[in-house]
Amino acid sequence: MTTPNLPDISFFDETFEEVLERNIKLFEECYFQEHEERYILHPGDPIRIQIYASSYREYQLCKYNNELAKQNSL
């Protein structure tokens, strides 16, 4: 029995860099709305390091869920 030539499916297409940039921009926008002043996250900023860690975890969870979804599809 041969396997059909089905295209690879993906439910999550973002790269880690895209997840990180989205979360940094989200923080900066929320900070501006709350305090009405700009806060730029520079490399080495403790808040940016926290966002990096949480973005990495978010990315890994999405990749894991993507693999689970693939296993449950035809």
Image (spheres, rainbow, N blue to C red):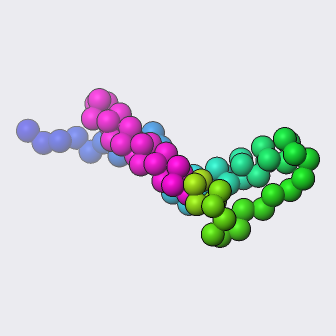
Residue 11 falls in image quadrant: top left
Check residue 64 for magenta coloring: yes
Q: Residue furthest bottom?
A: 43
Q: Where residue 47 sits in the image (x, y, percent)?
A: 65, 56
* 42 vs 7, nearest the viewer: 42
Q: Residue furthest left?
A: 1
Q: Mainly helix, strand or loop, the magenta region?
A: helix
Figure label count: 0
Magenta stretch, residue numbers: 52-74
For image coordinates 32% across by 36% down, the residue present is: 68
Q: Residue furthest right?
A: 36
Is residue 67 in view from this perspective? yes
For image coordinates 38% across by 38% down, the residue present is: 65
Instruction: Give the position of the C terminus as an image quadrant.
Output: top left
Residue 50 falls in image quadrant: bottom right
Check residue 2 for magenta coloring: no
For image coordinates 54% across by 51% down, the residue present is: 55
Is residue 18 in view from this perspective? no
Q: Is residue 2 above or below residue 44?
A: above
Q: Is residue 32 above or below residue 68?
A: below
Q: Is residue 72 above or below residue 36?
A: above
Classify residue 62 as left or right of residue 38. Answer: left
Residue 9 falls in image quadrant: top left
* 61 vs 15, nearest the viewer: 61
Q: Where residue 12 sits in the image (x, y, percent)?
A: 47, 43
Instruction: Give the position of the N terminus as an image quadrant.
Output: top left
Classify residue 40 as left or right of residue 51. Answer: right
For image coordinates 64% across by 50% down, the residue present is: 23
Q: Where residue 53 sits in the image (x, y, percent)?
A: 51, 55
